[in-house]
Image (cartoon, rainbow, N blue to C red):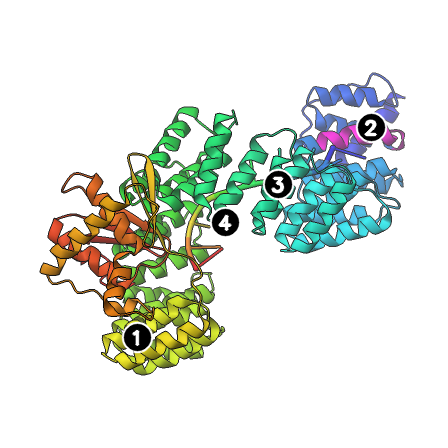
Amino acid sequence: MLRKLNYRFSQAKRKFSSTTVSFTRQPTLSSFPPNPTDLKALLSNGQLEDALLEMAIQGLEIKFEGYDTILNECVNRRAIREGQRVHSHMIKTHYHPPVYLRTRLVVFYTKCECLGDARKVFDEMPDRNVVAWTAIISAYSQRGYASEALNLFRQMLRSGSEPNAFTFASVLTSCKGALRVEYGMQIHSLIVKSMLESHIYVGSSLLDMYAKFGKIHEARGVFEGLPERDVVSCTAIISGYAQMGLDEEALELFRRLQREGMTCNYVTYASVLTALSGLAAVDHGKQIHNHVLRSELPFYVVLQNSLIDMYSKCGNLTYSRRIFDNMSERTVMSWNAMLVGYSKHGKGREVVELFKLLREQNKVKPDTVTFLAVLSGCSHGGMEDRGLEFFDEMVSGKNGVKPEIEHYSCVVDILGRSGKVEEAFEFIKQMPFEPTAAMWGSLLGACRVHLNVDIGELVAERLIEMEPENSGNYVLLSNLYASMGRWEDVRNVRELMNEKAVIKEPGRSWIELNQTLHTFHASDRTHPRKEEVFAKVKELLVKIKQAGYTPDLSCVLHDVDEEQKEKILLGHSEKLALAFGLIDTPPGKPVQVMKNLRICVDCHNFAKFVSKVYGREVSLRDKNRFHHIIGGICSCGDYW
DNA sequence: GTAGGGTTAG
């Protein structure tokens, strides 16, 4: 008997000699053949290797319970090689595992990220249960194969297997990944039929799916219908608003839920910080920062990335850089957030230097966003030649990131900015992508600054063809004609616009003073202090006119007389917000105004005169970038 | 046994 055991033991040792398993200790067998209880005892002592050894020794005797126990342990420890050995042991010994064990194998392989092996076991299953289906679906979903996950879900339904809450929660994620809103809605009706709409996991996934497809009302409906809320469902709805750019709604909901006792974690704060970045609500942002510091949350790098972004979008690059410098670990997003910050502030030199540092440190691989930030940073920061060099590097394939359409768009911007309008036009015609409206828009802007009507007209024609409803395009063309003194053409543009255009998004500007956001719309008659604000605008106008300001009437395309046009211009929301800032802050203090769209030529000029005449530093953050105006000179170089 | 929310760009 003992010899038999020794023989088997040495055989087993040979079998396992290729693994990392070390045999410092001989397993103690209480009986022969050993039973699953022995295995469990070994496993509970953490002796997975010994358990495997015993399994090999006893051969066929192990069967169901032993395999189950060991595989479970392999899953818990993510012990890939050991689990694979268990699986091959089954095959070698011609053991045919029941559904339960096959499911265990599928789960083992999916958890160990061996999708191919998982799929093989799954495909060979004679009958599949809901757990196996869900495990394989979520494995595909989590690894980014959303369409395949949806395919499998359809197969599951056809096979007659009934999805449970786990399945629904998982498959909804695939709908987001595969951009299939119609499937999401069909699945929603299945969920309702299964009475799982109020399930906390299913509900959060469902509301997140709606939010990701821009159906925020549906998302909110699902959220309000949840019988209980937790940190995930609350975060999902807040981030839903934030991701849609509904920043005020996101902030408002966050504050309400906080009052109602919501718990927050790092994901919640990261989502709220996105909204605060959009609003440039730096006082609120600092409060969150304090919370974060006090609570010592895990996954700090994600939060730090959000904080870098928040501070830079609130105009405080110094804070951003301080956080960046103090990070113990940086991801590519950390670098990107910092580079984007410099880029939006027109700090070309800093962009190039930081990118150099990124390469020197050689810890993080730059990605497509990195190059987008670098190219647009070079463009906005007066480093056009460096920008073109980086782009050439991308084209040559030296840095491993191939240029995409957005990078080409940056190059159009760079060429246009440096006055190479013809070159930019040729570049667009020859690039391997269909030009976008944004590209033509950027080139039309270049034509305006560099007074190139010939190309401007061609570009405008294509642009208006592509986006006949976008009033901004007509304004650019009108500006171009006006700058050449072609008033007849300005009138024609207006008529053309009257036929087709609608104002897509109303202009809105805001300013944060003493932790309060004050928002203004064009010709705002609703603000409680409107009289004061309008009076201040008039006062500013008188003073800056004396200093040489003349309104740029080509920014107004309404069919009205000149006096009316000037009135409309004075009602632009950024002027109101700027005036309000001047009223409510002491002389000499910098003022920062945010705008949801691109700033108009006249308002830009207005702000420059105000900064000069009143000796104020004025910062304007528009849709694309910051304008830092000191003494009448803007950091954008009058090109944006 | 299987499941939900997050940070950079556009």
Chain identifier of the residue bearing label 1 in the image: A
Chain identifier of the residue bearing label 4 in the image: A
State the residue position of label 1: A447
| Residue at image point 44% right, 66% down | A502
Disc 2 to disc 1: CB gap under 8 Å:
no
Report the quarter where the C terminus of chain A lies: bottom left
The verdict on a common chain for dots 2 and 4 is: yes
State the residue position of label 3: A221
The image shows residue A633 at horizontal and vertical percentages of 17, 58
Q: Earlier in the sequence, mark 2 or mark 3?
A: 2
- Label 1 and label 3: CA atoms lie apart by 48 Å
| Residue at image point 82% right, 26% down | A6
Mark 4 crowdedness (10 Å alpha carbons): few <14, some 14-19, many ≥20:
some
Q: Earlier in the sequence, mark 2 or mark 4?
A: 2
Chain identifier of the residue bearing label 2 in the image: A
Q: Earlier in the sequence, mark 2 or mark 1?
A: 2
State the residue position of label 4: A244
The verdict on a common chain for dots 2 and 3 is: yes
Q: Is residue A360 visible?
A: no
The residue furthest bottom is: A454
The image shows residue A142 at horizontal and vertical percentages of 64, 46
Magenta highlight on residue A320:
no
Helix, strand or loop at label 4? It is loop
State the residue position of label 2: A66
- Label 2 and label 4: CA atoms lie apart by 52 Å
The verdict on a common chain for dots 2 and 1 is: yes
Chain identifier of the residue bearing label 3 in the image: A
Magenta highlight on residue A61:
yes
Q: Which span of residues is magenta-colored?
A: A60-74
Q: Is residue A601 visible?
A: yes
Q: From the viewer's perspective, is A201 left or right of A451?
A: right
Q: Earlier in the sequence, mark 1 or mark 4?
A: 4
